[in-house]
Amino acid sequence: MSGIADIRKCIETAKKVEEWQRRAVLFVDEVHRFNKAQQDALLPHVENGTVILIGATTENPYFEVNKALVSRSRIFQLQSLNSTEVEEIIDQALTDSERGFGNKQVNLAAEARRHLAHVAGGDARAALNALELAVLTSQADENGMLQITLEVAEESIQQRAVLYDKDGDAHFDTISAFIKSMRGSDPDAALFWMAKMVEAGEDPRFIFRRMLIFAGEDVGMADPQALGVVSSAAQAFDYVGMPEGRYHLAQACLYLSTAPKSNSAFAFFDAIL
C-alpha cells in the first residue's frame, strides 16, 4: 500500500543511518505490486548504495520487476519446505511453551503428523493452522491428554489421507497396478492409479521415469513416437510445474495406455544372455 512518498521517507532515514557509517536495509514485501514509477524511484538509491534493497515477491521477478532493478539485483529462489521439514516445525510447535502447545499434553499420532505435513504442500503456516485447530477442538481424555488422531487431522485440514507409503507395499503395489493398467490398454484404470500417486505426494518425475521405461519396454517399435511424446511431456512438466503439469502427466499416460504394444526391444537382454 506504500507510495513514492513512503519511499522518500525511507530514503531520508537511510541517509541519516549512512551518516553513522552504517548501511540501511530496505525490505519491500510483494515488491511486484509497486508500479513502474515506484520501482524507478528506488533505482538511484540502490545504485549509489544508500540502501540495500531486499524485495520479496511471489511472482516471477523477471516479468514483474523493472529490468533495470533486476539487473542490479541478485535473484534467490526460495523453495517450498519438504514434508520432513514441516514435520519438524510441527514438533517444535508441540514443545514450545511460549509460542506453541508445550504447556499442553498433546499426543500427535505419527500418521496424523505425516498427513498434516503432506497436505500443507510445503506451507508451514497451513500445517500450524491445522494443528492449532486440532488442538483447540479436541477434548482431553481421563489423563488430561489431547489425542490427535489421523481422523482429527483430516478434519482439521479438510482433506482425507490417501493410503500410500513411498517406502512400503502400497508404493510398489500402486506403481505395479499403474504399469499393468497401461500394459492392458486400460486408460481409465491407468489414470486412476496415477491420480492416487500424485494425490499421495509421489514425485511426478518418478512417474515420468516409469513411463519413459514403459515407452521403450512395452510400446517399443509398435509406436516409436511414444518415446518422443513422453519425453516432450516430461520436459513440458519441468517447464510448467504443478498443478498445470498434471495435463502433461495425463497426456503421456493416455498416449501409452492407448498405444499398440510391442516388447521387441527386450531382445537386447536376450542377446546379452
Image (cartoon, rainbow, N blue to C red):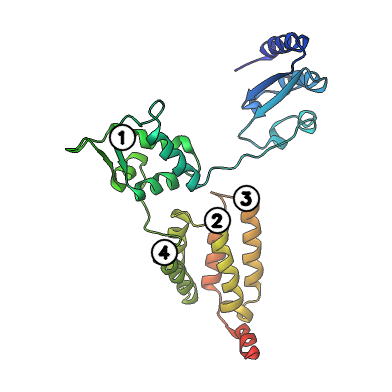
- Viewer-side residue, 267 vs 76: 76
Residue drawn where x is 67% and y is 37% of the image: 60
- The residue labelled by disc 4 is 168
Is disc 2 placed on a helix, strand or loop? helix
Disc 2 target residue: 247
In the figure, residue 98 lies in which quadrant? top left
Mark 1 or 3, which is nearer the eye? 1
The secondary structure type at the circle numbered 1 is helix
Q: Position of residue 174 (x, y in %)?
A: 43, 66
Asked whether the viewer can see residue 129, the reply is no
Q: Which mark is residue 240?
A: 3
Question: Is residue 196 visible in this depiction of the protein?
Answer: yes
Q: Position of residue 77 (x, y in %)?
A: 65, 40
User: Answer yes or no: do the residues labelled 1 and 2 have beta carbons within 8 Å?
Assistant: no
Label whose residue precedes the other's in the sequence (2 or 4) = 4
Question: Mark 1 sits on what residue?
Answer: 135
Label 1 or label 2, whichever lies nearer to me, is 1
